[in-house]
Image (cartoon, helix red, strand yellow):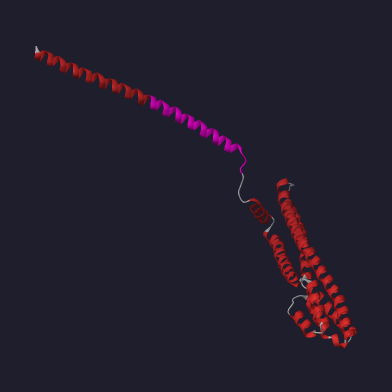
Amino acid sequence: MKKLFAIIAMMGVFAFGATQSMMAQADSAAVDSAAVDTTVVDSAAVDTAAAAVTEDIAQEPIVEEGGIHKELKTKFIEGDAGFMSLVAIALVLGLAFCIERIIYLSLAEINVKKLLNSLEEKLSAGDVEGAKEICRNTRGPVASICYQGLMRIDEGIENVERSVVAYGSVQSSYLEQGCSWITLFIAMAPSLGFLGTVIGMVMAFDEIQRAGDISPTIVAGGMKVALITTIFGIVVALILQIFYNYILSKIETITAHMEEATISLLDMCMKYNLKK
């Protein structure tokens, strides 16, 4: 009997173990099946979302990077390199002269009232050499004019005035030096653009003659070149004109300071000669 119970117990244990194993396998199979189903569903959802995103991207306008710089480069190439290069050279050379004049005029500007006050103190004390030293150590045309006047202070007020006026005209010519080149490039830039316009129209008519028919594509190509060169020429002229007007305003300001200094210096020289 004990052996029978032992055999029955062992058979029960094996049966229970087999049942548990079969249940575990069934659960694993169910889980795997669910996972597969979920994966298929997720994959389908991802594919659908990707297709939607791709469609949205295809519908959105493509924004190219580069901005104005890239657009100008493209138009420069489309406008015929020959004439566009001439317009670009006119812009570069014109800006070079403008920058040189602006630097020169900026260095020529000084505090005129401070200079005149220093000269008046020296002349009131009778120190002409000290006044000359101040003028030598000060940059700009105003100090140069005052120095020339002080060089003739012992020769009478008329000689001082004559010397100051003569040297003032020389300094004015120095201030305006190079401005004629700027006006040349201002005139050249649109002229080169108009020349490109005429040549572009001639090219368009040549293409029409070769084709034997008036095609919008043929006409548009030549006219596009013509208009681009004109636009760039006018833009270059406008840029240089702005710099040129700024330079003229600085020249007028310095010239006014020179005239003011001349009048004040003559008064100081007159007072100095009266004290002597």
Q: Is residue 35 above or below residue 226?
A: above
Q: Position of residue 153 (x, y in %)?
A: 85, 85
Answer left or right for 70 relative to 94: left
Residue 128 seen from this side: yes
Image point 21% across, 17% down: which residue?
Answer: 15
Answer left or right for 246 relative to 165: left
Q: Nearer the viewer, residue 26 or 16?
A: 16
Main secondary structure found in the magenta portion = helix
Image point 39% across, 27% down: which residue?
Answer: 36
Q: Nearer the viewer, residue 86 or 45?
A: 45
Q: Is residue 234 above or below residue 257?
A: above
Furthest toward the top, the residue is 1
Q: Is residue 212 above or below residue 9?
A: below
Image point 17% across, 16% down: which residue?
Answer: 11
Q: Position of residue 27 (x, y in %)?
A: 32, 22
Residue 176 seen from this side: no
Q: Quadrant of residue 79?
A: bottom right
Q: Quadrant of residue 43?
A: top left
Q: Position of residue 246 (x, y in %)?
A: 78, 64
Q: Is residue 38 magenta?
A: yes
Q: Quadrant of the N terminus?
A: top left
Q: Which residues are magenta?
A: 34-62
Q: Nearer the viewer, residue 202 or 161?
A: 161
Q: Position of residue 243 (x, y in %)?
A: 76, 63
Image point 76% across, 54% down: which residue?
Answer: 201
Q: Quadrant of the C terminus?
A: bottom right
